[in-house]
Each structure stands twice: as structure tokens, then as C-alpha cells.
Image (spheres, rainbow, N blue to C red):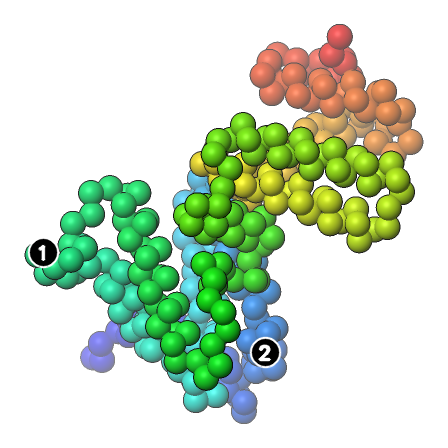
Amino acid sequence: MPDTPRPIDRLLDIMARLRDPESGCPWDVEQSFATIAPYTIEEAYEVAEAIAARDMAALEDELGDLLLQVVFHAQMAREAGLFDFDAVSTAIGDKMVRRHPHVFGPKDAPGARVGSAEAQTAAWEEHKAAERRHRRSGEAEEAPASVLDGVPRALPALTRAFKLGKRAARNGFDWPTADRVIDKIEEEIGELRAEIAEGGPRHRLEEELGDLLFACANLARHLGADPEAAVRRANRKFERRFRRLEALLAAQGRGPKGAPLDDLEALWQQAKAEETDPTRVNQPGKAEE
């Protein structure tokens, strides 16, 4: 009886068959790196959502979906003669060993002792910087180096703002305290208000709004918070409260569209109050005093 293939080998074989030009799935065959990239990003967010919901069954499922994205890209690369899944696995394994000399290297080697997670983070970033310098040394026409090199442009904008600020901060360019960042946020709000009052063009409004959001991302960094996670949490809270507002209106035979703003605000405040005082949930339509 033949040995049962490892699950990863089975998955690689499934993807190869899906991509077979003769007998595969037409949709899978038509895909490219560019068309699959949005799905890869989406699956990563669904992993984060399952974690936020503490839904381990969903996490197992979403991690499988994310792994499929890696397998899909690796299969397309193999077909193009670029690399394959084994090469991807080998490269990340080598990288993890290289960036953890305190775990995998000789105990008496430089960097073999890391006393804390903070120290490891600093060491990790130094390894990354060294790797970037090594890559740049092989470029035919080397562009001016920057400590900001390597922060992916495809990251969500708030995450990239967070990472750019973090890189700059490690090199001495930062606000000294969170209070100073809040001062900067208030300054940016003032500039945005002035631009709105002047009726400035859209690109100027977007520029001022961008400055404000960039400062907010850096406040998150100073507070030890993830700005994307903070906004996702705010989104969930807004959705939860708005759905409750809709339910309260439905109990009155109404909907949000066309309802007076004062009524909507009163019901919104009730939805907020119910989250801290569940006894109010049984009083549909009763707005907060």
C-alpha cells in the first residue's frame, strides 16, 4: 500500500492540476500574479478578522485559504521557470535561521544572546537592514540609500504610515511623547479646517487630510497600538451600533433614510447606552434622556 502523501504535497498536486492548460480549471488557468494578488491580500485580512473574533475554527479555515494563495503564486512561478514552492520554503527557512543567531547559531557567537523581545526586535531590524544593503550592493546603478528602503508601497496606507514613522523614529526623527503627537494632530486639524474654510481644491483637502491621518498613525505607534486594528475595531463598533439603530427604527415602522437627524442621534445614543446597560435593550424606541 503506497504511503499517504503529506497534506502539503497533496495541495501542491491539486494546484498543479487546476493550472493544467489541457485538463485544469479555466478560471485558475487564466490567472496571473497580478489577478491573484488582491485575493492574497483579502485572505490575509480574513485571517486577521478570525483572530480578532477569537474564532479558532474560522482561523483554521482562513489559514488554509491563505496557504492556498502561496501555493497558487508558487505554481505560477514554477510554470514560468522562476522558482517553486520548495524554493520559497527554503528561502524563508534560511532567512529565519539567519535572523535568529541567538537560537540557531553557536552559543558563543556575536549576537548569540538576546535578553528580551525588544532586543530581538532591534536585532531583527538590523539583520533586515544588512540584507537590504547587501541587495543594493549588487545593483548596477545604486540609488541613494535610505532608512525607509524596504517599506512596501503596497501596504495599507495606515500600516505603511506606521512603519515609515517607526523607521524614522529608530533613526532619531520622532516626537518625544504621545502628547506632542496629539499637538501635531491638533495642528493638522487646524490646517484642514482652514483649507475647508477657504474652499480649497480637492487635492489640497486630500493633502491636509492625509497629513492628519499620517499623524494619527504615528500616535498609534506611540501608544503601542496597531492603527489598522484600531480602525477595524471602530468599524465593528460602528456597524454594531448602526444595526441596532436600524432595529430600533424598524420597531417604530421606520428606516434611517428620511428620519430626522435628531431622532437618529437619540437612537444612536441609546444603542451606545445599551452596550454598557443591557437592561435598556428591552426598551425599543426609548431614547437616552
The spot of residue 39 in percent (x, y) is: 57, 64
The spot of residue 199 in percent (x, y) is: 89, 42
If the image is split into quadrants, where does the C terminus sit?
top right
**Which residue corresponds to the image point at 61% horizontal and 82% vertical from the top-left?**
30
Residue 140's tag is none
Determine the secondary structure under disc 2: loop
Q: Residue furthest left?
A: 108
Q: Is residue 239 left or right of residue 11?
A: right
Q: Is residue 127 left or right of residue 281?
A: left
Determine the secondary structure under disc 1: loop
Q: Which is more toward the observer, 36 or 284?
A: 36
Q: Is residue 92 above or below residue 283?
A: below
**Which residue corresponds to the image point at 15% horizontal and 57% vertical from the top-left?**
110
- Local packing at callout 2 (Cα closer than 10 Å; few below 14, some 14-19, many 20+) is some
Q: State which mark lies toward you, 2 or 1.
A: 1
Asked whether residue 45 is in view, the answer is no
Q: Which is more toward the observer, 243 or 116?
A: 116
Amino acid found under the numbered disc labelled 1: Lys
Residue placed under numbered mark 1 in the picture:
107
- Local packing at callout 1 (Cα closer than 10 Å; few below 14, some 14-19, many 20+) is few
Quarter of the image for residue 281 reads top right
Residue placed under numbered mark 2 in the picture:
31
- The answer for how far apart the CA atoms under marks 2 and 1 are is 47 Å
Q: Which is more toward the observer, 89 or 106?
A: 106
**Which residue corresponds to the image point at 44% horizontal and 45% vertical from the top-left?**
172
Quarter of the image for residue 213 reads top right
The spot of residue 35 in percent (x, y) is: 61, 73
